[in-house]
């Protein structure tokens, strides 16, 4: 009898069956990858709740989608706890938490404002850890659940001009894998999605090229839905970027040559500050 070959990706029917009725909360849900993912989840039959630090934006986004919207500051433990409480009180026990909130400052590290360094780590790394701990405690008590942490391929590709962001996202990747192993047997999974450069405000003022292709937020959303339908430790978006996991094995000479060829050696240092001004102001708090 021939062996049944399992498809590499869940199809639409499998995704809908896996997500139907699940309560899924997502931070940074007012715009960009967060809102796109929430839209796909909602269309797949999930019961979605949006969280965002921008109360006005999340209120509008939630109204547009027809779901619950809540203000949450992921850098404040009490705020995150209140967000989870509010979702569970109005929607139901959370089956999946997507830690999507994040910022991406770029530029010369030696001139970085120390407050921005701290803010990036507070949101991109410590906020993920806080939300994961608070949600996982509830999930372990119920015997099931999943945390999906949105990291970045930047966590595997050290790049000039992105030192702070690189460090934060690398932390998310390793933290998530370690905790997924720690929670073995509890019924709770911790997964990570690593998008490449995505066409959102995060890349405003940056110049990509044919060798560094930016993808749409819908491609990231598709991978998020897939990893919920079939939990695994991590996945890149797109899948073709999975080679980044081997980057640490490459020699420094090869890495330098690759950065020169793709222009990654200067891409995040030569920034159009005028085009990036609105985003920079927003992430500065």
Image: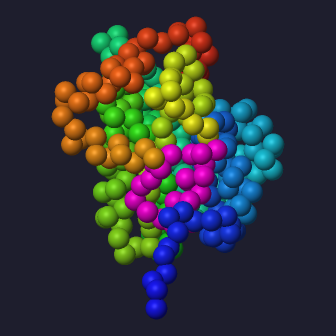
Residue extent of the magenta highlight: 218-239
Residue 39 placement (x, y as % from top left): 71, 49
Residue at screen point 56% across, 53% down: 224
Instruction: Residue at 51% x, 18% y: name it.
Output: 207
Tell me if residue 216 comes above or below residue 23 in the rendering: above
The front one of 144 and 229 is 229
Quadrant, the C terminus: top right
Q: Is residue 3 left or right of residue 166?
A: right
The correct choice, above or below, for 276 with respect to 37 in the image is above
Number of marks present in the image shown: 0
Residue lying furthest bottom: 1
Q: Position of residue 249 (x, y in %)?
A: 21, 43
Residue depicted at x 40% and y 73%: 186
Q: Nearer the viewer, residue 133 or 194?
A: 194
Q: x%, y% of residue 50?
A: 66, 47
Tell me which colouring the rendered structure shows. Answer: rainbow
Residue shown at the point (47%, 50%) measured from the top left: 239
Q: Is residue 229 magenta?
A: yes
Query: Can see residue 148?
Result: yes
Given residues 88 and 106, the one toward you in this image is 106
Residue 204, image quadrant: top right
Q: Write down the quadrant of residue 17 in the picture.
A: bottom right
Q: Please identify the quarter of the rendering in which residue 219 is found.
A: top right
Q: Position of residue 270 (x, y in %)?
A: 43, 11
């Amino acid at each position: 009898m021939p062996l049944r070959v399992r498809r590499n990706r869940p199809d639409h029917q499998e995704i809908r069956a896996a997500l139907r009725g699940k309560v899924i909360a997502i931070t940074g849900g007012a715009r960009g990858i967060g809102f796109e993912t929430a839209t796909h989840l909602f269309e797949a039959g999930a019961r979605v709740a949006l969280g965002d630090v921008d109360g006005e934006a999340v209120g509008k986004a939630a109204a547009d989608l027809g779901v619950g919207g809540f203000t949450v500051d992921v850098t404040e433990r009490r705020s995150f706890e209140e967000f989870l409480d509010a979702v569970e009180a109005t929607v139901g026990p959370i089956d999946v938490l997507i830690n999507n909130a994040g910022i991406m400052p770029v530029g010369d590290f030696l001139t970085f404002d120390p407050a921005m360094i701290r803010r990036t780590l507070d949101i991109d790394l410590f906020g993920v850890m806080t939300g994961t701990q608070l949600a996982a405690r509830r999930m372990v008590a119920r015997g099931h659940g999943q945390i999906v942490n949105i990291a970045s391929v930047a966590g595997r590709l050290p790049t000039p001009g992105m030192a702070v962001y690189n460090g934060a996202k690398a932390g998310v990747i390793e933290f998530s894998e370690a905790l997924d192993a720690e929670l073995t047997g509890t019924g709770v999974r911790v997964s990570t999605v690593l998008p490449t450069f995505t066409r959102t405000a995060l890349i405003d003022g940056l110049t990509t090229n044919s060798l560094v292709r930016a993808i749409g937020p819908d491609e990231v959303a598709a991978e998020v839905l897939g990893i919920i339908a079939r939990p695994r430790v991590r996945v890149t978006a797109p899948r073709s970027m999975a080679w980044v996991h081997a980057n640490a094995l490459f020699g420094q000479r090869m890495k330098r040559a690759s950065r020169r060829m793709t222009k990654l050696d200067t891409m995040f240092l030569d920034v159009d500050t005028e085009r990036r001004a609105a985003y920079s102001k927003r992430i500065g708090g």
